[in-house]
Image (spheres, grey):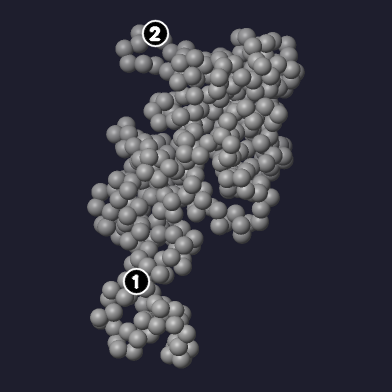
């Protein structure tokens, strides 16, 4: 599939690109083949949706980008490039640590799992900021000291003035720069806290000053989800990977979370990769969609193209399973069961459930083929219509 990936996005500058990614899990029963040659390309500034049934490998594929994988996961093959940089799968842990949170952030779907119950909300939001932008926070803290210096002793006023002017004086040599900073660490913490309160305000948190002083158990499910979003945006990353951000929240809260995501794109130009099985969410905010089934990408296209005119039999089944208000017809279901990935079908993994399957579908995996401008399908049925027919 990698030979056709260049057609998936005409953006000259590569933002996020996954090439031919294979990932397995080693379990007691054997090897689970979770990802089967995933190709994905994302433009800067877009909201890209990755949709599919639970267990199809969506979350694993995206966690591979920042290598947040379980110990028994093994990437067998593939490359992941971010903003034209070196392959993320090959860089050191220290280099990747500098990218996580600062350039790429994740919004997880289970706030109670990823929030620390022993830390105040404000401290959790500012944690990444202090880790990645400590020097900037120290400078802001010193500026706060400058505002407060009327309450300082005459000696520390002089030391602070010298510190602010980066002056190499005998006083600084005697007292040292670090002790000055440590002596007034509370102001540095306050500078970080102000940034965290601002992030909570951006995600629409009511009374962010009060929320910053509370703990996880004191918040509702929707508020916890917004805290995760605040943690993700506080460093203003170029890419946010949102893993089922509207799961387990009511419809009203879901709408508010989606609005926050749209606002991030509009205000900061943030690129967002949205992982979900909720087609309603996808249709509301996404620019393009990747449809995934059992570890394989089966269709790629503009949100309107796929919602209104899906080509792959699995995508067609997904759209037919949507029940609209006032629709008197029964829901259509996709026959059969999702395959066991420890022993997946050969060829197209959807062929055992496909009414239009051909002999070749069970032998060889189809390549990504263009069926119309900007619309790609991995299905043998459309090879004759493709300019990439092989």
Image quarter for residue 188? bottom left
Q: Residues within 10 Å of mark 2 (few under 14, many from 20)?
A: few
Return the x and y of residue 156 as percentages of the image width and height: 34, 85
Q: Residue at x 64, y 20 (%)?
A: 369
Residue on which the image places disc 1: 143
Q: Write the residue at 42% across / 18% down.
A: 322
- The residue identified by callout 2 is 329
Residue 335, how many percent across, how many down? 56, 14
Residue count near mark 1 (Cα–Cα under 10 Å), binned few <14, some 14–19, many ≥20: some
Seen from the viewer's position, the closer of residues 165 and 231 is 165
Distance between the alpha carbons at the discs numbered 2 and 1: 66 Å
Q: Earlier in the sequence, mark 2 or mark 1?
A: 1
In the rendered view of the protein, which quadrant contains the N terminus?
Answer: top right
Q: Is residue 26 above or below residue 177?
A: above
Question: Is residue 66 at least partly visible in the picture?
Answer: yes
Element type at mark 2: loop
For numbered disc 1, what is the local secondary structure? Answer: helix
* Of residues 387 and 250, the one drawn nearer to the viewer in this rendering: 387
Q: Nearer the viewer, residue 253 or 185?
A: 185
Q: Position of residue 133 (x, y in %)?
A: 46, 62
Q: Residue at x 59, y 40 (%)?
A: 14
Tag 2–tag 1 contact (CB < 8 Å):
no
Q: Nearer the viewer, mark 2 or mark 1?
A: 1
């Amino acid at each position: 599939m990698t030979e056709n990936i260049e057609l998936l996005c005409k953006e000259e500058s590569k933002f996020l690109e996954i090439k031919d990614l294979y990932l397995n899990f080693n379990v007691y029963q054997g090897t689970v083949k979770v990802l089967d040659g995933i190709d994905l390309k994302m433009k800067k500034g877009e909201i890209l949706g990755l949709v599919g049934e639970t267990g199809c490998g969506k979350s694993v594929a995206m966690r591979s980008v920042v290598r947040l994988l379980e110990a028994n996961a093994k990437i067998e093959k593939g490359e992941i490039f971010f903003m034209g940089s070196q392959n993320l799968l090959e860089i050191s842990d220290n280099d990747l640590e500098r990218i996580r949170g600062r350039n790429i952030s994740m919004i997880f779907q289970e706030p109670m799992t990823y929030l620390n119950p022993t830390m105040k909300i404000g401290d959790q939001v500012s944690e990444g900021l202090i880790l990645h932008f400590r020097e900037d926070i120290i400078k802001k803290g010193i500026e706060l000291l400058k505002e407060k210096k009327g309450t300082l002793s005459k000696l520390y006023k002089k030391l602070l003035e010298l510190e602010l002017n980066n002056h190499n004086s005998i006083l600084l040599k005697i007292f040292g720069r670090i002790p000055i900073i440590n002596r007034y660490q509370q102001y540095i913490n306050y500078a970080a806290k102000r940034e965290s309160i601002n992030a909570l305000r951006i995600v629409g948190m009511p009374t962010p000053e009060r929320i910053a002083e509370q703990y996880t158990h004191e918040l509702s499910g929707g508020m916890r989800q917004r805290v995760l979003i605040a943690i993700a945006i506080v460093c203003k990353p170029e890419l946010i990977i949102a893993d089922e951000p509207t799961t387990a929240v009511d419809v009203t809260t879901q709408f508010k979370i989606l609005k926050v995501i749209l606002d991030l794109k509009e205000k900061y130009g943030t690129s967002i990769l949205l992982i979900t099985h909720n087609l309603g969410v996808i249709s509301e905010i996404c620019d393009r969609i990747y449809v995934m089934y059992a570890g394989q990408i089966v269709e790629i296209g503009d949100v309107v193209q796929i919602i209104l005119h899906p080509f792959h039999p699995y995508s067609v089944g997904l759209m037919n399973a949507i029940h609209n208000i006032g629709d008197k017809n029964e829901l259509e279901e996709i026959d059969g069961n999702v395959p066991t990935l420890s022993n997946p079908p050969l060829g197209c993994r959807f062929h055992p459930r496909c009414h239009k399957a051909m002999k070749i579908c069970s032998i060889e995996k189809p390549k990504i083929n263009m069926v119309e401008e900007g619309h790609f399908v991995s299905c043998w049925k459309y090879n004759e219509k493709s300019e990439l027919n092989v």
